[in-house]
Amino acid sequence: MSARQFVILSRNGSKDGSLAPIGTRREILKGLEHCNTAPEAEGGDVLYGPGIEIELPPGQDPVSQMLLSISDDDIAWVVVIRLAREFGWKILDPTSGRELNP
């Protein structure tokens, strides 16, 4: 069974209608580090955490969106809700168009 995927976006809008930045790569990596979510190797674009994987767009800085994959439904949603609240993210389900704004 394949992992469920979602898009992570900033809750803040931008004045020109483009995607608002979530943060710099450095800010994102540093912030997620204390949540046990990090790349396997330095400079990696895929961050691994409890029940989740977060893919940063290669070469994009600041980051305006990230891909979230749920690998373990039993533990992932507690982690996702906590991260979204702490970092001011909204989670978009690209299949249904529904947004989660915890």
Image (cartoon, grey):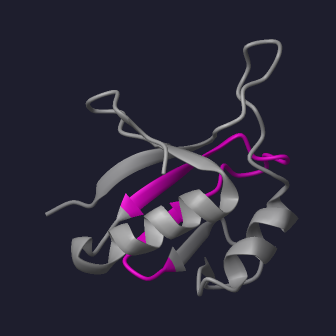
Q: Position of residue 97 (x, y in %)?
A: 34, 27
Q: Position of residue 37 (x, y in %)?
A: 59, 80
Which range is magenta? 49-69
Q: How many numbered dots are placed on residues in this image?
A: 0
Vertical relation: 99 (above or below) 69 = above
Q: What residue is drawn where x is 72% and y is 34%?
A: 12
Q: What residue is drawn where x is 35% and y is 39%?
A: 93
Q: What residue is drawn where x is 78% and y is 40%?
A: 21
User: Is residue 63 inside the magenta stretch?
Assistant: yes
- Front residue of this view, candidates 40 and 101: 101
Q: What residue is drawn where x is 73% and y is 13%?
A: 17
Q: Quadrant of residue 55?
A: bottom right
Is any part of residue 53 visible from this angle? no
- Front residue of this view, candidates 59 and 69: 69
Is any part of residue 77 visible from this angle? yes
Horizontal side of residue 60 vs 5, given as left or right = right
Residue extending farthest left = 1
User: Is residue 22 inside the magenta stretch?
Assistant: no
Q: Position of residue 79 (x, y in %)?
A: 45, 73
Image quarter where the N terminus lies is bottom left
Q: Position of residue 11 (x, y in %)?
A: 64, 38
Vertical relation: 62 (above or below) 79 = above
